[in-house]
Amino acid sequence: MSGSELGLAISVFLACAVEAVEALTIVLAVGSTRSWRSALTGVGAAVVVLAGLTGALGRALTALPIGALRVVVGGLLLIFGLQWLRKAILRAAGLKALHDEREAYEAERAAAGAAGAPGSGIDGYSFTIAFKGVLLEGLEVVFIVLTFGANQHDVGLAAAAAGVAVLLVVAAGLAIHAPLARVPENTMKFAVGVMLSSFGIFWGAEGAGAQWPGGDGALLAIVPAVLVFSLGLVAAARRRPGARTGEVARGEAVAGA
């Protein structure tokens, strides 16, 4: 396995694990409060939609010339990477509340309980919330899998990394019957943001005609550079008057999610 393939697998695995943890929290909340059958039906419907999108968009991406593909892939990865980095930097600096899965779980349970008693048959509330949660959390993963996989001509590797992440998260959730509140989500999001941004810079420049010294080896310089720059932004942001301690930010997690 080459360095770029390893980076692909790690990035997809971490991104999918983060999104799977958040989707698991939603499904656990509505399933345990209202209807497991309806919630799992919603999950299945969302997976079918995501699979269809993966197939359709995958064919569209692979039809592009390699230069155009790398520009498109690089641009998409930069967009996603910078979004993930922005939120992770703000949370690490105390300017945005940390996402707390336990509090998110309790909030979802409260909302599900306030929606009224489930009727017979499929419970529309459970189905809709589970479907929407899995679909929205899964969309970014689909795009990450497709962009990495299409550019490397190895969608299978990206899909396998995503599948392993989902299986591990689901297995952990089933084992403890609770949301995975101890997963270091912000650290994982920070790492994913660094990786996506680095690959976006690398492939976008290649698609535009640039030649990186050392080929794929240039990533060994790009990734640390993006990491150091991002950590510098965290340090600078922590000196701002509005920065809060981790304890305060964590206490506001649901409002800032």
Image (cartoon, rainbow, N blue to C red):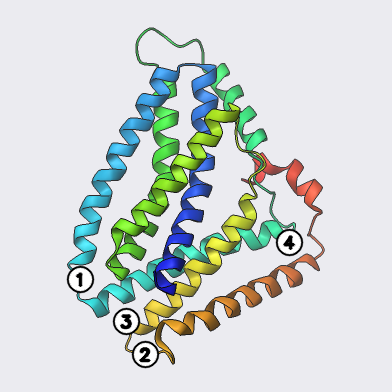
Query: Quick one: label 2, few (<14), some, or many (20+) residues within 10 Å?
Result: few
Q: Position of residue 52 (x, y in %)?
A: 24, 45
Q: Which label number is shown at residue 207?
A: 3
Q: Quadrant of the C terminus?
A: top right
- Return the disc, 2 or 1, that comes first in the chain's sequence: 1
Q: Position of residue 223 (x, y in %)?
A: 54, 76
- In the picture of the structure, the residue carrying the numbered disc 4 is 93
Between the C-alphas of marks 2 and 4, the distance is: 35 Å
**Closer to the camera: disc 2 or disc 4?**
2
Name the amino acid type tagged 4: Ala
- Return the disc, 4 or 1, that comes first in the chain's sequence: 1
- Return the disc, 2 or 4, that comes first in the chain's sequence: 4
Circle 4 sits in a helix, a strand or a loop, which is it?
loop
Query: Quick one: label 1, few (<14), some, or many (20+) residues within 10 Å?
Result: few
- In the picture of the structure, the residue carrying the numbered disc 2 is 210
Q: Quadrant of residue 211?
A: bottom left
Query: Quick one: label 4, few (<14), some, or many (20+) residues within 10 Å?
Result: many
**Residue name at image x 33 percent, y 85 percent:** 208
- In the picture of the structure, the residue carrying the numbered disc 1 is 64
- Return the disc, 4 or 3, that comes first in the chain's sequence: 4
Q: Quadrant of the N terminus?
A: bottom left
Circle 1 sits in a helix, a strand or a loop, which is it?
loop
